[in-house]
Image (cartoon, grey):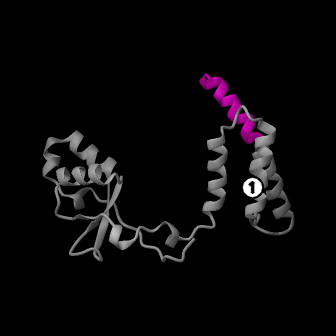
Amino acid sequence: MTPVSATGALARLTGPLRRALDGLDRRAHLAGRARANVSEDQLRDLVEEVTDAAGDQLIEPEDLEMMHSVVELGQTVVREVMVPRTAMVTIAASADLAQAMALFLQSGHSRVPVRGQDADDIVGVAYLKDAALAVWRDEAARGRTAAAVARPAFFVPESKP
């Protein structure tokens, strides 16, 4: 499929969804609400409607499954996607980027919490792409620590959706 035909197919796919969402928004506005409260069933119905309108040749089964997963993700609480403490992979803040790269490759994770004194003292999150970029751009970066490339960590309650 060429980029032009892919764009046309995407436009045909998103058109019915956009119109359906515009209709929901108009109804919500007329009802005096700022935003439409759409249930999971309504979103699922919209995905099915778009699938029917677009035809089977435009949406792969994997893409349809992904759309359903996105709808269901809103009902997932943080606790359900947390890694058990005993399976947690962390790296010391003082570890150099070569050690961080080795840990990324061994663990298969693309993000690893950076710990200070212990696993309860998380000072940031090291991303594989940040560490690899630092090593690739500058040979001197090899002496830098995991903490130097870590991004801020965000902490949320385990009951948060």
Q: Residues within 10 Å of mark 1 (few under 14, many from 20)?
A: some
| Residue 60: x %, y % from top left | 66, 37
Counting the numbered discs, the total is 1
| Residue 54: x %, y % from top left | 77, 36
> Residue 6 lies in what quarter of the image?
top right
Q: Nearer the viewer, residue 59 or 6?
A: 59
Q: Is residue 10 above or below residue 149?
A: above
Q: Is residue 10 above or below residue 73?
A: above
Q: Is residue 154 above or below residue 100?
A: below
Q: Tell me the quarter of the image containing the N terminus.
A: top right
Q: Residue at x 85, y 60 (%)?
A: 27
Q: Is residue 2 magenta?
A: yes
| Residue 109: x %, y % from top left | 35, 54
Q: Residue at x 79, y 54 (%)?
A: 45
Q: Tell me the quarter of the image containing the C terminus.
A: bottom right
Is 1 placed left or right of 41 in the picture?
A: left
| Residue 107: x %, y % from top left | 30, 54
Q: Is residue 128 above or below residue 123?
A: above
Q: Residue at x 77, y 64 (%)?
A: 36
Q: Which residues are magenta?
A: 1-15
Is 100 placed left or right of 156 in the picture?
A: left
Q: Amino acid at mark 1?
A: Arg
Q: Is residue 161 magenta?
A: no
State the SS at label 1. helix
Q: Residue furthest top?
A: 2
**Magenta stretch: helix, strand or loop mostly:** helix
Residue at image mark 1: 44
Is 99 placed left or right of 71 in the picture?
A: left
Q: Residue at x 60, y 25 (%)?
A: 3
